[in-house]
Structure formats: structure tokens, C-alpha cells
Image (cartoon, rainbow, N blue to C red):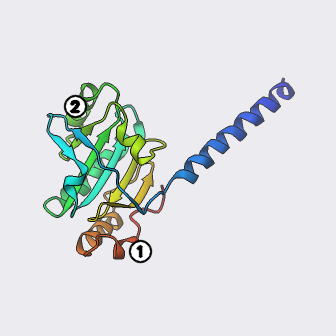
Amino acid sequence: MIKRWGAPLSILVAGLAAAAYVQVGQGKRSGFPAPDFTLPDLSGRVYRLSDFRGKVVFLNVWATWCPPCRMEMPSMETLYRRLKGRDFVMLAVSQDEDGSASVQPYVEQAGLTFPVLVDPKGVVSRQFGVTGYPETFVIDRQGRVIEHTIGPENWETEQSYRYFVRLLQSDAGASQARADQPTTGG
């Protein structure tokens, strides 16, 4: 029986490894202009990414059905609260197909206070080349993606906080901070 399944199992393992390699190979993209988008939040207020030019933007693409996405949300909230009131914007763009119907209860239960936008058609995922959830893009004051993180991160670490503080203190919002990336994984 083992011999009978050996070849198909090997092919399956090789295929999964190739898919992981492709996803990682496509990851960590940065240095490109952030594509503009316009999306509503849970209360219907419309946000346009280009309106935040001159600020540092933390853009997270996620879904409520994604356990790693839900896992990183509390640390995002902590980072948001620490940086609130500065030239820092955090946007979480939900890719849930049913929109606010599933997002609103989760946001309330989790006590999230940063803007959560709904994108049931997956426009942002396509524009930014998202390969899985969650993915985070850090956009500098000039509207360029300077960091791209694939997978969940613990955003409440001192290292992440210092990265964003340096980014906010730099004129370009990019030069000094790039030397000290916010995460080690991703």
C-alpha cells in the first residue's frame, strides 16, 4: 500500500513546496507606488488612500475567517494606540465577501478602534498583488510601499514601535527606517 501511494504523495509534497516557494518568491515586494483605492469603512465613511499622502500608512489586508489575521489584530490595536495622534494612519482592509455582515461583529468583539474598511470584491488584494492573508504594506509619506510583510506579526514589540517612530521622524518617511526593518519574519 505504501508503494502505491509513494509517487502520488511525492508529487503532492513537491507541488506544495513549489507553491510555498512561489508565494515566498513573490513576497516582500516594496519600492513601488502604492495603488490608490477608495473604500468605505463599517459606518459608510469613504476613505481614499491618496488622501493620506504626507502620512505614514500601515495597510493591512485581512479576512475574519483567517485565524492568523485575527491573531495579529490585538497587536495592531496596541501599535495604533501608541502611535495615534501622529502622522500615522492604520487601515485594515477586510476581504470578506459578505462585507460588514461578518466584519462588524468581529471588530466590536475585538475592540478595534482603527479604521476597518470593507472590500468584498478584493480590489485592494488585486492592486497590491496579495498572495495570502494577512499581508501588511507600510507606505511612506510620498505614497511608496517601503515594507511588505506576509503573514501575521506581533506589532506590539518595541522593535516595531521604534521602526515606526523612526519612520515618522524622518523627512522622507523611509530612509532611516529601512535600515531597521520592523520584523524578522514574514
Dot label at residue 75: none
Task: Give the percent coordinates (x, y) of residue 11.
Answer: 75, 35
Q: Please name the residue that numbered disc 1 is placed on.
A: 179
Q: Amino acid at mark 1?
A: Ala
Q: Earlier in the sequence, mark 1 or mark 2?
A: 2
Task: Give the percent coordinates (x, y) of residue 100.
Answer: 24, 29
Q: Please name the residue that numbered disc 2 is placed on.
A: 104
Work out whether 179 lies above or below 82.
Answer: below
Quadrant, the N terminus:
top right
Label 2 Cα neighbours within 10 Å, binned few <14 / some 14-19 / many ≥20: some
Mark 1–mark 2 Cα distance, whole angstroms, equals: 37 Å
Work out whether 144 lies above or below 18.
Answer: below
Work out whether 48 lies above or below 32.
Answer: above
Give the quadrant of residue 92: top left
Give left or right: position of 44 versus 101. left
Q: Residue at x 30, y 49 (%)?
A: 36
Task: Give the percent coordinates (x, y) of residue 105.
Answer: 23, 29
* Residue at the extreme right of the image, as rendered: 3
Work out whether 5 lies above or below 125.
Answer: above
